[in-house]
Image: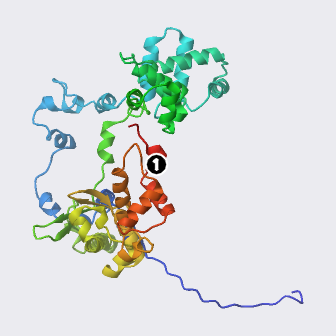
Amino acid sequence: MPQNASLRQDLTQRLQQTLSPAQLKFVRLLEMNQPEVEEEVRHELEENPALSTADADAAASDDFNETSEQVQLADYSDEEEIPHYRPGTHHHEAFDWAEASAQSSPMSLMEYLTAQINELHRDPAVAATAEYIAGYLDSNGYLSRTLPSIADDVAITTGVDIPMDMWQRGLETVQSLDPAGVGARDLRDCLLIQLRRMPDDQDGNVALALEIVNHYFDLFSLKHFRRIESALGIDSDRLRDAVDVIRSLNPKPAADIGEDPMLDRTRHIVADFIVEPTDEGSLTVTLPNSIPELAIERSFRDEPADAEARQFVTRRREQATDFIDMLRLRNETLFNVMSAIVNIQHDFFLSADESDLRPMVLKDVAALTGYDLSVISRATAGKYVATPSGTYPLKFFFNEGVSGKNALDEGHSTHSILAALRTIIESEDPSAPFSDDTIKERLAAEGIDIARRTVAKYRERLGIPVARLRKDIR
């Protein structure tokens, strides 16, 4: 050992908290919304033979010998109601689910355009380039790539060098397809394609709209209507009619093509809570629950004689018991958190007026429930509450009080200020919209004293443009 080497032992103390598997599973359950919990329950029922529904024992005693096909067919009162039923066949031959799925699937944008291309063109070269271009369109129907870059991609992948004039003919083909506006490079191009395919009316409004989009699109985008009137030598009435034509166009022509109507059913929000007022002026909180009552399966309640079997039964029974307890604790936690939110935001739940929302943060709910902030955060994340006035995400109710000479003293929440700002802007004259300074003064008159830059921040949060862009034609 070298002379300068030495042995040294250090003792350090570290405090570390680790969660048990059961605690981790509870945390995960708490974060789930209602559909996710229902799916988790179904998974547990499939995976753990010791877990069952409370009414399973009664069902198990019935003489149940139907096949899965008979269960499906029992939903129909007549054989002819069965999807793709063919008389004279056995039931297992009567279902062509692949065919049913194919017929119910919506046509994609690419398929929709390709079908038109094949009908319109006999020139295979033009049709091929048009199909290539159609494959580069985004979901709204826009072509974000340049023709040379598309030509390079095709040349590299296929080894075929297509002349640029052929690509231009292909693009013109795509832009001639329905819906009008597909194949456009940008919004202006999209509007021009639609306007050029519209017949002009007797007042010449379509022709005027075409000229505005073609030559004065920048002024139109910035709503410099006076300058457009001066440049074209027209009055505000003529301009208003032309602008109405432009606003009737579709800025996203392909957005609705290829959407599966069945997917809309899965996009709707499932409320985790329901809050309803009573006749006495109080509020009730309920947790809508389609989960059946869970219980320990009958055969797992007794101890088997065999040691190995007894170990298996005990382990599975404990897992099922823990899951039932965690599910009960989750519902209890969610109910207490929602009840605290209702207690704080009582006035809003009765009036549905955003100005009645009180400043509320996680600490306020923690003070009423006694839960840790992390528990409240997980219990409210991704959850929704249904009320008579609509369905709201729980995060909607959390908002800081706004600081200011009067705002904080009066207890104005972010939502109440946003509501007041929206009301002021909705009352303005469209031909002379309020500036941020004017909005600041009007808010101050209502007892909300905030800075002009704060007004601008909240206006942007509402998605409301500056006064110049809100200006409309008189």
**Residue 83: horizontal and vertical position, in percent?**
21, 31
- Which quadrant would the N terminus be assigned to in this image? bottom right
At horizontal 49% and vertical 28% (from top left) the residue drawn is 190
Residue that protrudes farthest toward the right in the picture: 3
Residue 431: percent from the left, percent from the top?
Answer: 40, 42
Mark yes or no: residue 182 visible. Answer: no
Residue 143 place in picture, x, y as percent: 54, 30
Looking at the picture, the colour scheme in use is rainbow
Total marks in image: 1
Vertical placement of residue 121 versus 35, above or below = above
- The quadrant in which residue 346 appears is bottom left
The quarter holding residue 128 reads top right
User: What's the residue at 36%, 75% (across, down)?
Assistant: 410
Q: Residue at x 48, y 38 (%)?
A: 223
Q: Horizontally, is 123 left or right of 279 in the view?
A: right
In front: 2, or 211? 211
The quadrant the C terminus occupies is top left
Could you tell me residue 39's position as x and y percent? 31, 56
Occupied quadrant, residue 55: bottom left
In this rendering, is residue 91 above or below 431? above
Q: Is residue 138 above or below residue 382?
A: above
Q: Residue at x 52, y 31 (%)?
A: 217
Q: Secondary structure at mark 1?
A: helix
Farthest residue to the top: give it.
Answer: 122
Q: Is residue 35 visible in this depiction of the protein? A: yes
Q: Residues within 10 Å of mark 1 (few under 14, many from 20)?
A: some
Check disc 1 and report the residue beneath it: 467
Q: Nearer the viewer, residue 199 or 282?
A: 199
Amino acid carrying label 1: it is Ala
Q: Is 90 drawn above or below residue 304 in the view shown?
A: above
